[in-house]
Amino acid sequence: MMAREVEKIEYIIRECLNFVRPAELGLREVRIDRVVEGVVTRMKTVHSGMEFQVHKPADVELVAESDGSLLEQAITNLLS
């Protein structure tokens, strides 16, 4: 319970900081499938009672020009 409250406070502080100073984007080619798999692996560890599944064709690489850290944070936020 305490850890969850700390996460909420950290989130609020991060959002306030992002609002007052826009982040510089570190654009590069990012494998979206790898980012998603990394986030899901972390979520499985943190939320062991929940089930997460990733469905994508095995022979497809999902690549985008993006900021990998921000993309990872966005996916984490969506799954939290």
Image (spheres, rainbow, N blue to C red):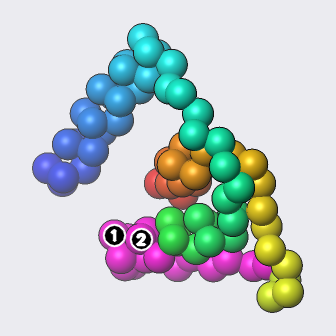
- Picture coordinates of residue 74 (x, y %)? 57, 46
- Picture coordinates of residue 19 (x, y %)? 46, 16
Q: Residue at x 47, y 76 (%)?
A: 41
Which residue is more in the foreground, 59 or 56? 59
Whether residues under marks 1 and 2 lie with C-beta atoms below 8 angstroms apart, the answer is yes
- The residue to which callout 1 is attached is 46
In the image, residue 80 lies in the stretch drawn in magenta:
no
- Picture coordinates of residue 65 (x, y %)? 75, 49
Segment tinted magenta in the rendering: 41-56
Specify the quadrant of the image occupied by residue 53.
bottom right
Tag 2 secondary structure: helix
Q: Is 37 left or right of 11, judged from the image as shown?
A: right
- The residue to which callout 2 is attached is 42
**Which amino acid type is marked by label 1?**
Val
Q: Residue at x 27, y 36 (%)?
A: 10
In the image, residue 50 lies in the stretch drawn in magenta:
yes
Which residue is more in the foreground, 24 or 72? 24
Specify the quadrant of the image occupied by residue 72.
bottom right
Residue 50 is at least partly visible in this image: no
Q: Is 47 left or right of 75, judged from the image as shown?
A: left
In the displayed structure, 5 sits above or below 25; it is below
Crowding near the residue tagged with mark 2, few <14, some 14–19, many ≥20 C-alpha atoms within 10 Å: few
